[in-house]
Image (tube, rainbow, N blue to C red):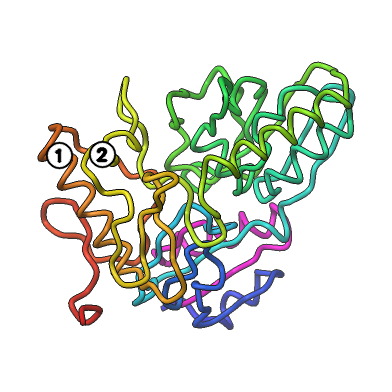
Amino acid sequence: MLSIDQIKKFFRGYIGIGEPLARLTTFKVGGQADFYFEPADPGDLAVLVSLLNENQFPFVLMTTGSNILVSDHGYRGAVINLERGLGKIEFDGEFVKAGAGAKLAHFVDACVEENLHGAEMLAGIHGTLGGAVVSNERAYGGTISDHLVEVELIRRGEPTKLPKEAIIFGYRYSSLQDDIVVGASFKFPFGDKTEMKRVCRELILRRRESQPDDSTSAGWIFKNPVMNSAARLIENCGLNGLKIRDARVPEKHPNFIVNLGNASSGDILKIIRRIEDEVQTKFGVMLELDVRLLGFPERIDGRVEELASNEA
């Protein structure tokens, strides 16, 4: 059985026990994790992952908490946050090397300050660089992989590096789903700083005008189906404004769910299931989640549901 004393012999970062996850997510919901870790650096992360794997102890990565719904009953495993120890960004001419824990907002601003063009499309998107690479974050006609050179990762417990050519990228997808991204390198062309700052301001404003306040949501709930729009399908089902207790589908953009203050993860999950069922019934389309579900029990059919004790 894995013990804190055993971990402390090898791990140099922060260790939390029974850490409340609600404060770490933009939904502001979720119970406790058994263990919570913030590695001090990439080497510390590699040691921790090796130790957890050796003891067959379940773990997940969770950084800004902007794309995740955590069960009210918490997570029986370890949560690893990379922001503190893997957030460094380094420049060498047109080349940029960034840690997986670097916030996208910081990454964009730093690239612009170095007169490097190509990262502006990510302006206004929450999350970290590692998560953006794994999901091949896209916006306004571009993807984060467009300028990617190489990815540093832990694969099957071993640190390794992969050139872009060895990775499969698709719509909000990469073949890195089962890996732990440690960092990534990019090559951007030089550009005009004034123009890039203007583009960043414009994109941030556009997001604010078209999307609800993302401080209590998790971003897009569903991926867009091929040649279709999840928001349009949801709207055509008349689900704008759908509300269950303090969880609500906003009128402004129905592919979001917001927590009005006291929603539970169960409330949010009920709305997700209602949307899935109605869209499938009316249009024959099974929407694919763009948020991760953590700590929920899985049913035989592969779907997850909140525990019955969360019902009222």
Q: Residue at x 69, y 52 (%)?
A: 42
Lower sequence index among marks 2 and 1: 1
Query: Label 2 crowding class (10 Å Cα cut-off): few <14, some 14-19, many 20+?
Result: many
Q: Which residue is mark 1?
A: 280
Q: Which residue is mark 2?
A: 287
The answer to whether the residue labelled 2 contacts the one labelled 1, judged by CB atoms less than 8 Å apart, is yes
Q: Percent from the top left, x then y, of residue 4?
A: 55, 81
Query: Label 1 crowding class (10 Å Cα cut-off): few <14, some 14-19, many 20+?
Result: some
Q: Residue at x 28, y 67 (%)?
A: 244
- Mark 2: which secondary structure? loop
Left or right relative to 263: residue 122: right
**Which one is in front, 194 or 12?**
194
Q: Percent from the top left, x then y, of residue 204?
A: 67, 39
Amino acid marked by disc 1: Gln
**Which one is in front, 216 or 232?**
232
Q: Is residue 290 above or below residue 233?
A: below
Q: Does the magenta-highlighted stretch encompass residue 42?
A: yes
Q: Residue at x 34, y 30 (%)?
A: 229
Mark 2 → mark 1, Cα distance in angstroms: 8 Å
**Which one is in front, 236 or 304?**
236
Left or right relative to 45: residue 297: left
Left or right relative to 48: residue 305: left
| Disc assigned to residue 132 | none
Span colored in magenta:
34-61
Q: Is residue 168 above or below residue 82?
A: above
Q: Percent from the top left, x then y, of residue 193?
A: 88, 26
Figure quadrant of residue 38: bottom right
Q: Does the magenta-highlighted stretch encompass residue 91?
A: no
Amino acid marked by disc 2: Leu
